Image: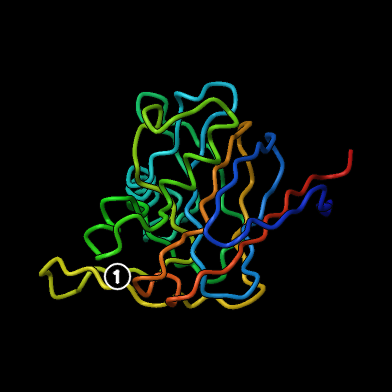
Amino acid sequence: MMSSKVINEFVIPKCMGKAFKVRKGQLFRVIEIEGKQVASLMFFNANNYKEQFMAEFSGGLNYFHPSGLGSHYRLSKLYSKVPYENVMLSVTHNKIGDHFLGPHCTKKMMEIWGAPGHRSCSDNFSDALREFGLRHEDIYSPSTLNAFANVQIDPQGDGTINIDPPRSEKGDFIEFQAEMDVLVAVSVCPDDKSAMNDHSCKAIKIQILDFPQ
């Protein structure tokens, strides 16, 4: 099997965001530099920004996937929103398997947590997507793939959401393969108020890989 080669890599500083494009067939990795840091991810069709990743919808489709690769919460395929419903990316490596398909932290969340004015993932996404002419008004849903997030809904059924420190350690990564040209937006979550990032924000490394021609 032909091996992939790193063609670009960069570090997104703690509490910041960045957007970049990945071509169809390429891989990209979200890598823990120190460990226990969540990266929130949005995806757009790079040739039609109206076609966007739909987090909870992808979770549902993976659960009912006929191949049996889904049948659980861990994602294998990431789908775009209706009416497109296309596979945008495939997950090719995910040792930890922890993620939360839900909202990223926002200004209002920080206010509720008693930290008005605190930086949020919304700020990170705004800054990152501005380079590509996108605003929050253009984003279909605030729900994202929150990679490495250790979030559980209480099994007793009372609806309690428990946020525990991530289980990911230095060097752990999640790898995706682009099934179309995609614009990726990453927020290195700036939440140090909850246990989401173990109360200490760290940087995230990105690698883009391609296969030799």
Left or right: residue 186 compared with residue 150? right
Q: Secondary structure at mark 1?
A: strand
Point out the residue furthest to the front here: 117
- Label 1 environment density (alpha carbons within 10 Å; few <14, some 14–19, many ≥20): some
Q: Which one is in front, 61 or 202? A: 202
Residue at x 10%, y 69% (from the top left corner) = 158
Please name the amino acid that badge 1 sits on: Gln
- Residue at label 1? 152
Quarter of the image that includes the N terminus: bottom right
Q: Is residue 179 above or below residue 27?
A: above
Q: Position of residue 183 (x, y in %)?
A: 59, 35
Location of residue 79 (image quadrant): top left
Q: Position of residue 174 (x, y in %)?
A: 59, 61
Point out the residue furthest to the left here: 158
Tally of numbered discs: 1
Residue at x 63%, y 76% (from the top left corner) = 170
Q: Position of residue 168 (x, y in %)?
A: 53, 75
Location of residue 73 (image quadrant): bottom left
Quarter of the image that includes the C terminus: top right
Residue at x 64%, y 39% (from the top left corner) = 20
Q: Is residue 126 above or below residue 138?
A: below
Residue at x 43%, y 60% (from the top left corner) = 74
Q: Is residue 57 above or below residue 94?
A: above
Q: How is the image coloured?
A: rainbow
Q: Which one is in front, 144 or 119? A: 119
Q: Position of residue 154 (x, y in %)?
A: 20, 73
Left or right: residue 84 compared with residue 43? left
Left or right: residue 168 compared with residue 6? left
